[in-house]
């Protein structure tokens, strides 16, 4: 059994790497097609005055127009595409060094080839991969020297200058656009992850921590602007008995129905959250106590009148504790404790009611169900 669990985890890890690697391979496929096509004219202009044999021209064409497609298929069919694409990038660097030596280190084509490859490698893998690319380029130079001989061409012709211009202008523009797209995607993912980290998965409302953060913001705003607000803690009565009698699926339906009801009946400025288990919480900025009591009693009545097709006999009710902001509150926990005490009083005096505490700490008042 231990082996089965290990293999399953290993498979999941491989699948995650595969998804990441395929995304990288698709991005690099486009940039490799463009970069090597433009690089062909740069290298061809550097090689032309040296009168290379036909096999060199054939190899140049292969590198520019066939290798990008082979590299993509190699990565796509690999068990770990991410590693395969890193290998492809090292092959690119090796071939870049090879052509630099073949051109006898002609200054402009050499600088164009090496600098743009360096930019590509450091953008994709940082300094460690940049250094690995440099080693691959050096190996390409070492392999090419015996084939083409050691030499140096100090002059760059007008043809070579114009052949390098597209590579110097279009490829950085394309790479910058790809990086921009990636940054946009990462930014969207970051926002989505932030939203998920602040949201309760079952109800779709703020989770406990995010709601308390909003409560602290509202407390500071009330203190700073000398304005009022109310908070409510809402408990589904006898929720454990609902789960035990009708099942957890029915319990989840009840939680979702309450969440939906809250979303439908709150203002944009109100903040609803799931405090935990069967307990929900609300922040009602700028709402006086009397209005807050009316809103919560209306919520209690609406929720109590809901029917459940899956369980027609199911009856639900709410106990709600309300508390208004008071300058006498030492901190946000004092305000929250008032709401918690009001909820406790509603639950211990018969449930299915709204109980509240005024901000001036006057005695509680309970609203019995109509």
Image (tube, grey):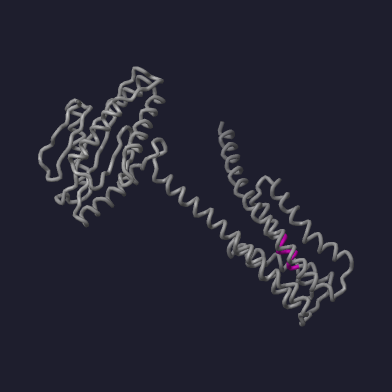
> Which residue does the image show at 34% across and 32% down from the upper left?
258
Q: Is residue 93 magenta?
A: yes
Q: Residue 86's spot in the image, x, y percent? A: 66, 56
Q: Which residue sits at x=64%, y=54%?
A: 27
Q: Which residues are magenta?
A: 91-97
Residue 223 image-quadrant placement: bottom left
Q: Position of residue 32 (x, y in %)?
A: 70, 59
Q: Quadrant of the N terminus?
A: top right
**Residue nearest the viewer, comparing 214 with 25:** 214
Q: Does residue 129 lie above or below 330 as drawn?
A: below
Q: Which residue reaches farthest left? A: 362
Q: Give the residue at the far bottom of this rendering.
A: 155
Identify whether 227 is placed above or below 114.
above
Q: Using residue 246 as the reference point, say whether residue 173 is left or right of it.
A: right
Place of residue 43 in the rendered image (x, y in percent of width and height, measured from the top left): 77, 70
Left or right of 334 on screen, residue 55? right
């Amino acid at each position: 059994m231990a082996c089965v669990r290990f293999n399953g985890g290993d498979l999941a890890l491989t699948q995650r790497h595969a998804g990441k690697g395929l995304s990288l391979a698709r991005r690099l496929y486009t940039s490799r097609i463009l970069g090597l096509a433009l690089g062909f004219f740069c290298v061809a202009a550097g090689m032309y005055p040296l009168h290379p044999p036909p096999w060199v021209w054939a190899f140049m064409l292969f590198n520019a127009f066939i290798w990008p497609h082979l590299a993509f298929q190699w990565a796509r069919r690999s068990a770990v595409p991410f590693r395969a694409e890193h290998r492809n990038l090292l092959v690119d660097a090796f071939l870049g060094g090879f052509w630099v030596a073949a051109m006898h280190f002609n200054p402009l084509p050499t600088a164009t080839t090496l600098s743009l490859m360096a930019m590509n490698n450091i953008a994709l893998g940082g300094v460690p991969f940049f250094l690995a690319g440099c080693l691959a380029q050096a190996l390409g130079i070492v392999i090419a020297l015996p084939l083409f001989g050691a030499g140096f061409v100090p002059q760059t012709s007008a043809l070579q200058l114009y052949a390098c211009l597209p590579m110097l202008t279009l490829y950085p523009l394309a790479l910058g656009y790809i990086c921009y797209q990636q940054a946009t995607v990462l930014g969207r993912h970051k926002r989505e992850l932030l939203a998920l980290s602040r949201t309760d998965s079952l109800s779709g409302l703020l989770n406990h921590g995010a709601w308390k953060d909003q409560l602290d913001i509202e407390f500071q705003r009330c203190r700073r602007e000398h304005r009022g607000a109310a908070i409510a803690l809402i408990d589904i009565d006898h929720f454990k008995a609902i789960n035990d009698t009708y099942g957890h699926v029915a319990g989840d339906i009840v939680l979702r129905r309450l969440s939906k009801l809250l979303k439908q009946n709150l203002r944009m400025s109100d903040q609803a959250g799931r405090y935990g288990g069967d307990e929900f919480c609300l922040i009602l900025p700028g709402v006086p106590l009397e209005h807050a009591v009316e809103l919560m009693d209306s919520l209690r009545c609406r929720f109590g009148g809901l029917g459940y097709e899956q369980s027609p006999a199911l009856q639900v009710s709410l106990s709600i504790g309300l508390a208004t902001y008071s300058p006498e509150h030492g901190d946000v926990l004092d305000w929250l404790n008032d709401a918690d005490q009001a909820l406790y009083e509603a639950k211990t005096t018969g449930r299915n009611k709204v109980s509240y505490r005024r901000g001036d700490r006057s005695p509680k008042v309970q609203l019995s169900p109509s």
